[in-house]
Amino acid sequence: MEVFRCAIFDFDMTLVDSSYAIRDTMNLLAERQGLPSVTREQVLSVIGLPIRESWIKIWGRFEEQWLEDFRAVFLEREFAGIVPFPGTISVLEALSEKGVILGIASNRHSPAHPLKATGLERYFRSVVGMADVVNAKPAPDMILRGMESLGCGADETLYVGDTADDMSAARAAGVKAVGLTTGNFTPEGLTEAGAWRVMDAIEEILPLWEGATP
């Protein structure tokens, strides 16, 4: 049986449902800048991408001023609307009780801020975002940095995410990955990208530690 001493998680649509909050704040920005409004489905199609790439995909271009306005005016409002999935806290509590060392690897610029806003920061010993590495996922940089910070090797680390880029990053880092269907990817898409297991809810990962003791 696999023994995972460390578990590193993506943030958006893995631990939390941020889709409605991102949609609403993007639409505030769109109104301010005269851009087309967006739907939750559009947001789900780009969650997990770096913010510049996601806006280019949705609006066809990107202006630095949009990002400045977003961070200055709307970012705190987005954080306030992010909601952990129903099983997230119980899973993090259970893993912590088993002595599993937890980390975050997210394509957000600074995931520590929304983690704090959602009350989840206390569970994580390592938090890595785009500001901390050269390359975003699907490159392995974030996961490798997280493992180094947590003091865990590839064979004792599990990565949990919801996108094909998450699975590709894990594969490139040499770690096993669980793909969650809580985002915008099908089980087939996650498997093709390199998922070791595919699950429909975060609480389904707990049996991977059955029998483990602190």
Image (tube, rainbow, N blue to C red):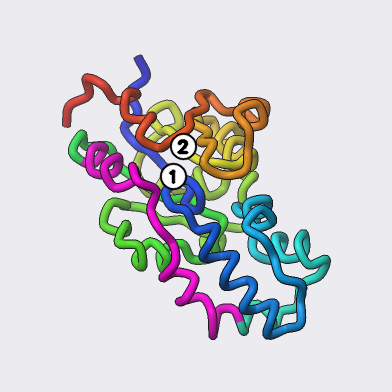
Horizontal and vertical percent position of residue 121: 31, 59
Give the CA distance from mark 1 to mark 2: 6 Å
Q: Are marks 1 and 2 in contact (CB under 8 Å)?
A: yes
In which quadrant of the rendered view does residue 156 lie? top left
Residue at x-position 53% and y-position 24%: 196
Horizontal and vertical percent position of residue 110: 49, 66
Q: Residues within 10 Å of mark 1 (few under 14, many from 20)?
A: many
Q: Is residue 77 magenta?
A: yes
> In terms of secondary structure, what is the magenta stretch mainly?
helix
Residue at x-position 51% and y-position 41%: 182
- In the orientation shown, which residue stands out farthest toward the right? 60
Horizontal and vertical percent position of residue 208: 34, 24
Q: Which residues are magenta?
A: 70-96
**Which quarter shows the C terminus?**
top left
Q: Is residue 94 magenta?
A: yes
In which quadrant of the rendered view does residue 167 lie? top right
**In the rendered view, would you say 104 is above or below 25?**
above
The three-letter code of the residue at mark 2 reads Tyr
Q: Does residue 136 appear in the picture of this structure?
A: no
**In front here: 92 or 100?**
92
Q: Does residue 213 appear in the picture of this structure?
A: yes
Q: Which residue is mark 1?
A: 9
The three-letter code of the residue at mark 1 reads Phe
Q: Which residue is mark 2?
A: 159
